[in-house]
């Protein structure tokens, strides 16, 4: 199969038939074998019934339904696991991403040998204050921290080689930083392509301002996990060693002062702020060491991070 189109959605029943017909038309026009995987992230507007109807008329349609809303990252993670195409393309279900971009993204992967190609919505139809300006700030921060030169990390329209999506894990709200996750996983050839951004035709946006706070926290998590996820002792151990050594040296100095420089002032050792500072540093050092050991145990023995309560599947092996 040439292409798997993975589409996470929440309450997008109005747009699904038009989106399906558009994708089908593009793939047939360019003789691309394909599957469309809809992941219903707990919709309550009849989206699953629409997917069921589409499946009945088109064997290339597959569907996964969550019993409740888990978020876009969870939907993408399950969609990636289910995809069987050589190239996996993700897009949003609200018709703001154009299926006409599929061929260009496909060729970027197959002919130019990119591991991942991210769309760049150079001209946007979103609200400047609530979406465009904050997005630019986050894109700049992510570029600076990751070294990946992309203009639009959060664009839902992306293309991947199959082995990329099979070797990364997306959880929490990490879908914004899939290029960063892919880079940490060893996939270095990451590019972008200018894509069309369309005004929303149906429904309303499902994301609020809180996503920017969550996005920044997720960015910090990404970089910590990328550098220290498999060796947490290298982080906690270094910090613990520094804290313990400073506290130990301070304690030795206080003892030396008490024993060899005995004065009326040094008698009240426990009344000195330096005593409590040294004690705190020693305790923090021990705690960080314990955290490092626990992190090592978890990283070597942890099970699967993601577990989803999936109620139904269409056209997929159980």
Image (cartoon, rainbow, N blue to C red):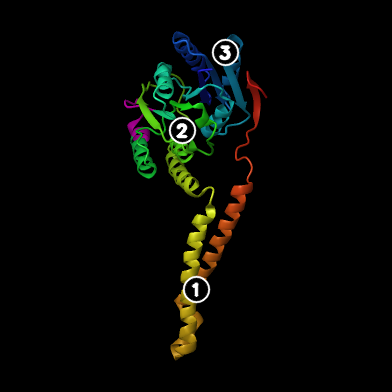
Residue 33 included in the magenta stretch of the image: no
Taking the spot 61% from the left edge, 48% from the top edge, the residue there is 300
Q: Quadrant of residue 143?
A: top left
Give whichever of 237, 204 is nearer the camera: 237
Disc 2 packing (10 Å; few <14; some 14–19; many ≥20): few
Residue under label 1: 248
Residue 314, relative to residue 306: is it above or below? above
Q: Earlier in the sequence, mark 3 or mark 1?
A: 3
Helix, strand or loop for disc 2 = loop
> Which segment did they paint magenta?
119-132
Q: Earlier in the sequence, mark 3 or mark 2?
A: 3
Residue under label 2: 207
Question: In front: mark 3 or mark 1?
Answer: 1
Give whichever of 261, 93 is nearer the camera: 261
Q: Is residue 28 left or right of residue 294?
A: left
Disc 1 packing (10 Å; few <14; some 14–19; many ≥20): some
Taking the spot 38% from the left edge, 44% from the top edge, the residue there is 145
Quadrant (top left/top right/bottom left/bottom right) for the N terminus: top right
Taking the spot 32% from the left edge, 25% from the top edge, the residue there is 123
Residue under label 3: 54
Q: Quadrant of residue 287?
A: bottom right
Q: Position of residue 64 (x, y in %)?
A: 60, 24
Q: Earlier in the sequence, mark 2 or mark 1?
A: 2
Q: Position of residue 92 (x, y in %)?
A: 47, 24
Q: Position of residue 309 (x, y in %)?
A: 65, 32
């Amino acid at each position: 199969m040439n292409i798997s189109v993975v589409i996470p959605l929440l309450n997008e029943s109005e747009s699904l038939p038009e989106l399906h017909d558009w994708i089908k038309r593009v793939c047939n026009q360019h003789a691309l074998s394909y599957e469309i995987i809809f992941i219903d992230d707990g919709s309550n507007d009849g989206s699953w019934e629409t997917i069921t109807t589409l499946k009945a008329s088109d064997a290339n349609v597959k569907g996964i339904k969550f019993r409740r809303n888990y978020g876009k990252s969870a939907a993408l993670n399950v969609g990636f696991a289910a995809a069987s195409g050589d190239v996996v393309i993700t897009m949003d279900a609200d018709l703001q991403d154009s299926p006409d971009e599929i061929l260009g993204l496909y060729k970027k992967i197959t002919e130019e040998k990119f591991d991942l190609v991210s769309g760049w919505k150079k001209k946007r139809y979103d609200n400047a204050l609530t979406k465009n300006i904050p997005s630019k700030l986050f894109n700049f921060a992510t570029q600076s921290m990751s070294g990946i030169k992309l203009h639009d990390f959060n664009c839902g329209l992306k293309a991947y080689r199959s082995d990329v999506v099979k070797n990364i894990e997306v959880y929490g709200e990490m879908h914004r930083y899939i290029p960063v996750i892919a880079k940490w996983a060893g996939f270095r050839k990451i590019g972008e392509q200018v894509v069309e951004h369309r005004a929303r035709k149906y429904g309303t946006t499902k994301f609020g301002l809180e996503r920017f706070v969550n996005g920044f926290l997720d960015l910090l998590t990404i970089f910590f996990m990328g550098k220290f996820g498999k060796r947490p002792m290298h982080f906690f151990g270094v910090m613990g060693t520094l804290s313990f050594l400073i506290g130990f040296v301070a304690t030795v100095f206080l003892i030396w002062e008490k024993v060899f420089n005995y004065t009326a002032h040094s008698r009240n050792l426990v009344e000195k702020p330096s005593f409590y500072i040294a004690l705190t540093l020693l305790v923090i050092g021990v705690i960080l060491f314990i955290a490092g050991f626990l992190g090592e145990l978890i990283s070597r023995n942890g099970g699967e991070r993601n577990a989803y309560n999936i109620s139904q599947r269409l056209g997929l092996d159980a």
